Image (cartoon, rainbow, N blue to C red):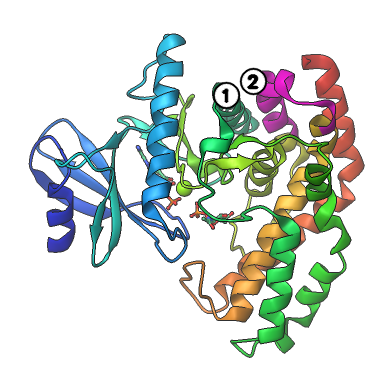
Amino acid sequence: MKTMINIAKEFAIEGNITNIAPYGSGHINSTFLISTDSSNEYILQKINTSVFKIPYELMENIVSVTNYLQDVIKRENGDPQREVLNVILTKDGNSYVLHESGAWRLLTFVPDSTTLQAVTCPKDFYFAGKAFGRFTKQLNDYPAETLHETIKNFHNTPVRYKNFEDAVAKNASGKADSVSDEIEFVRARKDFCSLFTDKVADGTLPLRVTHNDTKLNNVLFDKNTLLPIAVIDLDTVMPGLSLYDFGDAIRFGTNHADEDEKDLSKVWCDLELFEAFARGYLEECGCLLTDEELKMLPYAGKMLTLECGMRFLADHIAGDVYFKIHRENHNLDRARTQFKMVEDMEAKQDEMIAIIERLCKEIL
Ligand code: ADP
Ligand code: GN1
Ligand code: MG
């Protein structure tokens, strides 16, 4: 606590700190809410530097993208204090503090905002689609090649598959034999993994500035109106595919159950939610997408869900070295929900194709 107070004091905050409390439910960084005796609250975050190895580059991306978005939002007559993250610099003008405990950054807490861990009705997810679609649209002219790749090959699914096979071969936890069904589930889908990367290699799919971690809880909603305010959690903003953002949102948000639900009968892909998100997303950025991107949208949920499942399973087999866990076999439970979602998406593939075709005719 004393350490955190001292770290927070290095930033140019208003008022005296009255409380610091853990906040959020992320698997990688650690987040704290700082209350003060001024009217401002702050979000203090410890960046996981074994995942984000070069915090300087990470923060350079975030400062540059948020400055750019503030200008775009001003031009759109929006509120740049509210509709995009605001990074607070240290009293020396740096974007983070390097301490023996790690790299720390501070953001202004957006007042009267909330996040959702699961959708309560299709409208929430429609608005999440609008928020991420708007983010893509606002960054359409940002020079993607100037961004650092904060995690190399982050959504390169064939590379993720190879890492998964390496983890199985190494079997650091000794648990590989006990999860042979799950391992076979992934292996049966090996060929599917390269569907998007092959199209990047031959120039059919374009690289854009993408968010790459489009979970529903990375959209801030207004507490009172429940309208979307801003997209947050910008650590993985990098050049990527629109399909990564669309797919990861579908992975997390079309499942009514928790990502680590043990009762798999509660885990399935809700097509009404799929349609709601797709509608919001296409309304905002559909006209920027190429025919090939639109054609691939129905497969994006499955790709990102399979990828995430194999990452969880690989981490379980490797001995839980990447994602934070809070109980035994936590990463295995997470992997199983992802695989259940993949199976359900496979059964619903034709319906997803029909929904996207219909929405494209209606909206574009
Ligand atoms: P993680 O990597 O742990 O998901 P996030 O940046 O998403 O980290 O922050 C965790 C949670 O903290 C978010 O889901 C949101 O509830 C809250 N949060 C983060 N930044 C802000 C902000 N600027 N204003 C209000 N709430 C925020
Ligand atoms: C991690 O930190 P968080 O919870 O927003 C992970 C994402 C996964 C997600 C699964 C940098 O995101 O890629 O999709 O967990 N982030 C990183 O919930 O690996
Ligand atoms: Mg988050």
The residue positioned 39% from the left and 62% from the top of the image is 49
Camera-nearest residue between 348 and 182:
182
Q: Main secondary structure of the magenta part?
A: helix
Q: For numbered disc 1, what is the local secondary structure?
A: helix
Q: Which amino acid does label 1 sit on?
A: Arg
Q: Compared to 29, does 318 lie above or below? A: below
Q: Do the residues labelled 1 and 2 touch (CB within 8 Å)?
A: yes
The residue positioned 17% from the left and 54% from the top of the image is 7
Q: Residue 22 at what x, y percent from top left?
A: 30, 56
Could you say which quadrant of the image residue 240 lies in? top right
19 relative to 67 in the view: left or right: left
Residue range (magenta): 275-292
Label 2, residues with CA under 10 Å away: few <14, some 14-19, many ≥20:
many
The answer to whether residue 285 is magenta is yes
Mark nearer the N terminus (1 vs 2) = 1
Distance (Cα) linking label 1 and label 2: 5 Å
Image quarter in which the N terminus is found? bottom left
The residue positioned 72% from the left and 84% from the top of the image is 169
